[in-house]
Image: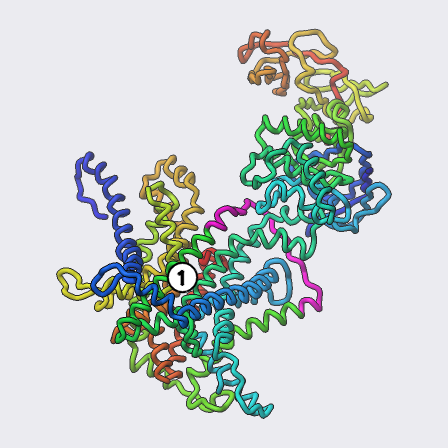
Amino acid sequence: MKIALRSVVKAFGGVTAVDGVSLDIGDGELFTLLGPSGCGKTTLLRLIAGFYAADGGEIWFGDRRVDALAPYERNIGMVFQNYALWPHMTVRGNVAYGLRLRRLPAAEVEDRLAEGLRQVNLVGLEQRYPGQLSGGQQQRVALARALVLNPDILLLDEPLSNLDAKIRVQVRAEIRRLQKQLGITTVYVTHDQEEALSLSDRVAVMREGRVLQVAAPKALYERPATRFVADFVGVNNFIPGVCRGSADGGVTVDTLLGAVRGRTVADVPAGARCVVAVRPENLALGAPGDNVFAGRVALASYLGSTLRYDVEAAGGLIVKVDIRDPWHHEPLAPGAAVTVSFPASAALALGDE
Amino acid sequence: MARPAGAAPARARARGVALPALGVAVIWLFLIVFLVYPLLRIFYDAVTDEAGAFTLQHVVEFAGDGYYRRSLVNSLLLGLGTVLATSVLGFAIAFLLVRYDFVGRGLFGYLTLIPIVSPPLVGVLGVTFILGRAGTVNVLLQDWFDVVRPVNFVYGVHGVLLVETLHLFPMITLNVVDALGKIDPALEEAAESVGARGWRKLRTITLPLTTPGYVAGALLVFIWTFSDFATPLVLGVHDLLAAQAYLNIVQFVDRRLFRMGIVISALMVVLALVFLVAARRYVAIKDYSSLSYSRIARRRLSGPRQVVAVAFLSLVMLASFVPYLGVALAAVGRGWSLTPFPVQYTVAYFERVIVETPKYIVNSFLYSGLAVALCVAVGVPIAWLLARTRVPGRDVLDGLNTLILAIPGTAIGIAYIRAFHVDLPGLERPLTSLWIILPIVLAIRRLPYTVRGSYASLLLVHRSMEEAAASVGATGLRTFRDVTLPLTWRGVLVGSLFSFMTSLQEASAVLFLSLGGWETMTVGIFSFYIAGSANEAAALGVILIAVAALSVVVINRVAGARMGGMFG
C-alpha cells in the first residue's frame, strides 16, 4: 500500500507542528521520520494513524483518501512508544483483542493468534500479563498485536526507545526482518540517527514541522542537503569559508585552513559564505591528500573501535580526526604537532544557514 | 526529645538506635491496646459464656434465629444495592467530569465533593423534613393535586437506599476521576487502532483500567452502608444487622440480647475483613498505574448533549442538596407542620444549642482536637516508617491501617465497651467511665486519613532530594527542616484536617461510648431527634455542615481538589 501526503498541516494553538508536508512512501517500503524532539515527526505519524485530524492537506493510502477517517477505518497497525499494552489482559488477550472485535470464527482467531505469536517468538508466554514480561517481550507483544490484523500499513512510534542498548539492536533487526518478510509498508519514527540509517529504505529528516531531505541512508549520510542534516546525521566537522567558484561538481573554498577543494550537491555561488563539511573518518593523519593542513593535538578520546583526536588548527578551529584501528596506533600526547589531510571527494560545501 | 548535653559518644550511638526503637514500640503498643485487643475481645466474648468458658451457644442461637438471618441478608442486599446505585451515578458523573467539556464543569466538579462531607445523621434528618410523610413534597402534593394519602418516599429500605446513595456516590466519583486521570491515552488509542470504539472500548478497555480505584471506593461504600444503623433507625427500618447490633447493645437489661449484639458485631468485623482481603487480592494483581505525562483531551459536547449533561448533573446535585435544604429550614423554622415551608422563623434553636447548652460544640471540638493530636503523633511516624524504612512488621502496620477503614464504627464502639470495662490498675475505675476514651476511639477511627495524607507527600520527596541536601553539607535535622518539611507539611495538614472533620462527624462508635456530660454534636443530633426535638437536632446539623464545608474549602486550597486518594 502506497502512502501519499499532500501539503499536510497541523497546528496546536499557535504552534504549527506539521507545516505543509508532502511525501510519497512506496509500497512495502520502510520509511523513517527522523528528527530532534519537537520536530513534528510524532505528530505526522499520528496524523497518518488518524489520532489527529489534519488542519489542511490530504492523506492517501493507495487510491483511498483517509484523512477524514477514524483510526479504526484506516486498517493500520500501530506500535506505541511505551507499547500501550492493556495491563488487565494477558498476552493472548492483547493480541487477540482486535481479532475478536472483527467477529472472526474462533478457529481463525486461534490460527492467526498462533501465527502472530510465532512470528515474534512469543509462543509459550500467552498467559502472562504485560507486567510479567521484559521490555523486549512487551515490545514484541505490541508488534504482534499490530501485525495480527494484517494491516495495510504499520506505524511505529519510537518503538525501541525504552529498551537497553543491546536488546535494541536485536529487536531492530527483528523488526526489519519481519517487515521485509511481510512486505508491509511501514512508517517508523525515531530521533536516533543510527537506528534510522541501519533500518530504513528511505529517511525523511524533519525540523520545525518541515521535511528537509528525503533520501536513502547512504545518500543521506554522504550527500546531506543542508548543514542541519549534515550535523544531525552522524558527526561532522564544519569549516567556515567563502566560496571561490565551482565547476563540474568541484568547488574551491577559502577557509582558515587555506584553500580547500571539495564538491557540492547544490550550486553555491562564488563569493557566498559557506561551510565545508567533512566527516572525522575521512580525515587522516600525515598521509598526502587533496587538502592538507597542520595543527596540534588538543584532546584524544579513546572509543574502542576508533580513537578520536580533537586537532586545533589555524585560528583555533577544532577538527575531529578518527583513527579507525587504534590497536595498531600509538596515541599521541596532547600538544603533539600533526599534519592532517582529507580527499576532495569527502569534503562537501554547503550553504551557510 | 531533649538530650542531656555532654553525653558520651558511645551512649549517644546506643541511643541512636534505642530512641527510634522506643518510638516504634510506643506506636505498636498504641495499636495493640486500642485496636487489636478490643477487636480480639469481641471475638472472645462471642464464643464464651458469662463464666468465661468456651461455648458456641451464642453463635448457634444467632444462626438459628430467622429474624437475624433475614437481617443479615437484608444488610448484604442493601450494601450491594447501594454499591450498584452509587456506581452507576458515580461512574456517569466521573466520566462527564473527566472526559467532556461543558458549561459549568468546574462548578459541578466542586459540588460533587459536597455530599460526602455531609454528616451522615444530618443527611437523613434533612431528607425526612423534605420527603417525609408530612414533609414539603407531600404537603405540596396534597395542596396542589388533592393527594389524600401521603406518598411514602423514604420510610423503608428504599429510603435507606436513596439516602445512602445520595450521600456516598462521591466516593465512587472521586476514585474513578482519579483512576481515569492516570490512564495512559495510548492505551485507548491502541484500542482504537485495532478497531474498538464507543461502548466497546469503554467496556473492554477503559472500565477495566479503573477497577483498582473503583474497587477501593466500592468497598468503602459497601461497608459504610452495611454498618450504618442511624439512617435505617431514623427511617424506621429495624431488620438490618447494624440496627440490630445497636438495639441489642444499648438496652442493658437482657443479657442474652446483649450477647447477640456482640455476636453481630463480631460477624460484621469478619465480613468487613473478608471483603477487605478479597478486594485487596483483587486489586493487588492489577497495578495499572503508568507514568503518563499526557492526558486524554476533553471533548466539547454538542449543544443538545450539553443540555442533557447539565440537566442530569443538576438533578443529581439538587437531590443531594435536599437534605441540606431540609436541615437549614428546620433549624430556623418555628412550628413547621403541614405547610410546605416554615411560616415563622427564629434563631431560638441555635441559641439553645450554642448558648444554653454549649457542651455539644465544646465537647466535639475538644475530643476531635485531641484525637487529631493523637493522629499526628502516631500517624506521621507510621507514614514515615511505611515510606522510608524497612522496619519488620511494615506490612502488618500497613494492613492494620487499611483495616481501620474497613471496620464498622458500630463494631469498634461495641468492642470498646467490652474491652475497657475493666478497672484500670491504680484508678479503680474502668476506662469506659473516663471521657478520654472518646478522643482515643476517634483517633483510632480516623488515623488512616492522617497516615495516608502524610505517606503520599513523603513519597513525593524522593530519597535523593534529601541525599542531595546531605551531600552539600546539611545535617539530618537541617535536611528535615529545609527539604523534607517544606515538601510534606501540606500532605500532613490535609490528612489531619480530614481526620478532624470526620472526627466531628463520627456518630456510630461515639453513640455507644458517650455518657452523660460527654455528648458531642452527633450524639446531640441523635438524642434530640429521638426525643422529638427535631429543630434543635437540625440546628446542630447546620453547625456541623458549616464546619465541614469550611474544612473542605481549606483542604481544597491546600491540596487542590485531589481528595480521591484519601478514600482509596
Front residue (pair B478, B221): B221
10 Å neighbourhood of mark 1: few (<14), some, or many (≥20)? many
Asked whether residue B156 is in view, the answer is: yes
- Picture quadrant where residue A144 is located: top right
Say if A91 sits above or below A259 in the image: below
Give the image's coloring scheme.
rainbow
Please give the range of residues in magenta: B281-307
- Picture quadrant where residue B252 is located: bottom left
Q: Chain of mark 1?
A: B
In the image: residue A348, left or right of residue B84: right
Number of numbered discs:
1
Q: Residue at x 71, y 38 (%)?
A: A111
Front residue (pair A59, A10): A59
Front residue (pair A273, A72): A72
Q: Label 1 belongs to which residue? A: B498
Q: Position of residue A264 (x, y in %)?
A: 79, 22
Q: Position of residue B538 (x, y in %)?
A: 41, 80
Asked whether residue A39 is in view, the answer is: no
The amino acid type found where label 1 is placed reads Phe
- Picture quadrant where residue A332 is located: top right
Q: Position of residue B300 (x, y in %)?
A: 67, 60
Residue B305 covered by magenta stretch:
yes
